Amino acid sequence: MPLAYLSDYSWDDVIPIPQDDGGENPLAPIAYQDDYKTATGYLRAVMSFEEVSERALQLTADLIFMNPAHYTVWTYRARLLFALKKDLEEELIWVEEVGRQFPKNYQIWNHREVIVDKYDNPSRELPFIEEMLELDSKNYHVWSYRQWLVRRFDLWITELAYTDRMIEDDVRNNSAWNHRFFAVFGKGDDVSQSIIDDEIDYAESAILKAPQNASAWNYLLGVLKCAKRPVSEIEEFCNDLAAVQTTEHSVDVDTDQITSARALEVLAEIYDSRDEVDKAADAWTLLAEKYDPIRENYWKFKKSQAIHRLAATA
Amino acid sequence: MHRRVHRTVFRSRAGSRSSNWSSPTSTSTSTSTSTASLVTTSCAKKSPRTRKPVSTNPNTRVAIAMTAEQNNVHNAEVSVVDSLITESSTAQDEVVRLCTGLIIDGQLPLLQRQLHADFLKIPMSFKLPPNYTGLDASKPWLIYWPLQALGILDPDSLTGDILSRIGPSIMACLNETEGAFGGGNGQISHLAATYACLNALAIARDEDVWSQINRERLYKWLMSIKRPDGGFSMHVGGEEDVRAVYCALASAALLNIITPELTEGTAEWISRCQTYEGGIGGAPDNEAHGGYAFCALASLCILGNPVEMIPKYLDVDNLLRWLSVRQYQPEGGFSGRTNKLVDGCYSWWVGGCWSILEGALFGITKEEILWSKADLQKFILCCCQSPKGGLRDKPGKSSDFYHSCYVLSGLSEVQHRYSFSLKLPGAGSGEWSFMWTCELELPDVVMVDEKNMVGPINPVHVLPAGIGERMHDFYAALDAVAA
């Protein structure tokens, strides 16, 4: 067996367990490098007798650098760290190195959660999260981890300002908007009407920067719904952005002035909620034909739903 | 509207077309009754409105020549555009540029079947190069993805030899004490691995191997990773998310081991994953995401009658709205999250959500399709085919097995219309995900060249139609005898 795996420890007493891919002609075999082949052979061996040792810990570190997606190694490593009573701060520093080398890896986040939970100290976390979000501002696992952390250590106070910074950098960063919603409503406390007003203002001013930005619109509508406030509250705002010209029974749009198809969609909802189905239908037709044509079928569906409902109540 | 053509019922019934799925080594082409070929044939014969390909040269890359309007596609860029430039908009503009370079008005490329099949057969013929080591903990997926893709693209290429090698390859990932599977030989039991292993074993159609699964142990393991809040962890000490829920439930459904105890609180937990945007996140509070949305919907289809479960646990209006915004103009493909880029894999994750909703909420969606199948077909055929074979995320990316599986599954969704049907024989609880039927999509929704046809799938299990049904029936029959 080629012993390309180099370690500070002696492995003479361990008989590596070779990988059995199944049968004589297995599907999807991988031509591993020798060091990986040897190291995973030792891994299977030490795991089979649940060895708790420094060399096993070293082995997990080496394997993680060869294949950071190897979740079994991470799980074993966490067990070893606790059993050997290792310094967990040191572990967090080491994980940060792994994160920098493999920024797309997501196993580190579950591992970090396990370690930080035990360590019961979040002080390294926000700076590291921030560093990783600078590399990829929409990294799903990093944002999820941040939410766990905020809940676990009651860190709500920093969050609104942080999302503000991220949204300032890219007003279309939907992960940041989602996190903002979490920061406002996630705690489960009653949210005061003045905070709701602030959030509506915040979303509206973001929309004015980029009126087609779905993230800010979703947030605005989400806040209204969560606060049980009527969508009609933003009718004037939408009127301007959609540049609508209305009569009692019809709606048209100034083609040169409209800056947001979403505003027109929200208006359609508002008309519909008031049973002004003629006007809602006009808005949906405009969306289908001109301002959001790929969703033609959806707009037609909204229209026929409204017409059917009206017919049923008439 | 009259719905045409042959109705494919997934479940094989004694004496009726059971040859589809009965023989694990059925490779005969003269009597080939694979669903893909049945559907293709009926499409050709019974669809007078399907246009004939313009060129008679079988090697031509262009299948259908017609204007964008005739073909129902939206190739024009959207008319209202923001001027503010941010990181997101720069990335988006670049993808539009790459895609529009490949979308030629009036032309729809042929599916390069042979090229893709050759690519998909690589894991059955060769050792994968060392750079696949990063997927060494995803071995079952490296087996399942190409099998699922070939199962709908070219089922006859799954020869007896290949099918017979699935069992040993998968059983090498089994942890006997738990009855569950890891991501490779000697790796700890993992739900995603278990799901992929069982799906691969379903495709293998090997009852001897099926008999070796210890369902009691697997059930105990599933209960051991169930969380008090109704969700599941991926593995002991692992993360809890809606993927884990889906993988647990789909596995349990195939093995006919669903119990009230296993599913208690799970629908409620899924419900908590729907966000203010209308989509569904990986866990409560997480951002809405197409992949998790599919896992959530498919899970509800396993937990009970989807006609009741989906509206009971999700805000359907908000979900429909969010799903409809996943499709981008002019690319035609789906994005997974708000303001992210289109990616071929969401052809399935988002397209699969549509399959399920169209099929289960027939009363809500009537005969309507709420999105543009023609545009997704355009995106898949123009932008997701790698010239080297295999399907890809988007132009500029390499093809891989993951994208090949889910892009082709998305193409299948374009070509078929699914419905949930309680009336199938043997209906009962625990079988909810095996009551799906499908028909070919109508040509006035999307023009499909018969040369591009792929087979239908079970939209809950992401398996070729009939495959999961057969595995479930095997265990259900065992349980009937035991009872």
Image (cartoon, coloured by chain):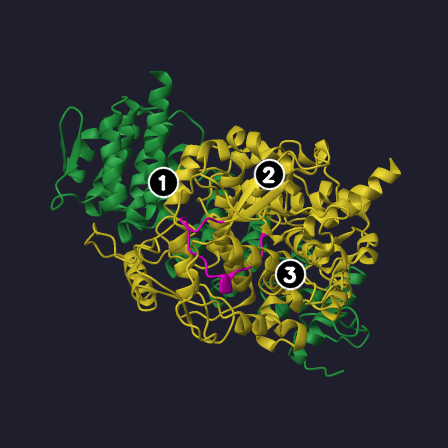
Chain colours: A green, B yellow
Residue B181 is at least partly visible in this image: no
Q: Tell which subunit mark 1 falls on.
A: A
Q: What numbered label is drawn on residue B144?
A: 3
Q: Is residue A272 magenta?
A: no
- Residue A13 image position (x, y, % from top left): 82, 74
Residue A11 is at least partly visible in this image: yes
Q: Quadrant of residue B333?
A: bottom left
Q: Is residue B445 magenta?
A: yes
What is the distance, in whole Å, between disc 1 and disc 2 at their CAs?
Answer: 23 Å
Q: Amino acid at mark 1?
A: Tyr
Q: Which residue is mark 1?
A: A298
Q: Which residues are magenta?
A: B441-456
What is the distance, in whole Å, between disc 2 and disc 3 at their CAs?
Answer: 22 Å
What is the distance, in whole Å, between disc 3 and disc 1 at their CAs?
Answer: 34 Å
Q: Which residue is mark 2?
A: B301
Give the foreground label among 3 and 1.
1
- Circle 3 packing at 10 Å, graded few (<14), some (14-19), many (20+), is many
Q: Secondary structure at mark 1?
A: helix
Q: Is residue B79 left or right of residue A74?
A: left
- Residue sitting at x 61%, y 57%: B38
Q: Residue furthest top?
A: A314
CB of mark 2 within 8 Å of CB of mark 3? no
- Residue B364 image position (x, y, % from top left): 46, 32
Q: Amino acid at mark 3?
A: Tyr
Q: Is residue B110 left or right of residue A83?
A: left
Rendered-image quadrant of the C terminus of chain A = top left
Q: Residue furthest bottom?
A: A2
- Circle 1 packing at 10 Å, graded few (<14), some (14-19), many (20+), is many
Q: Secondary structure at mark 3?
A: helix
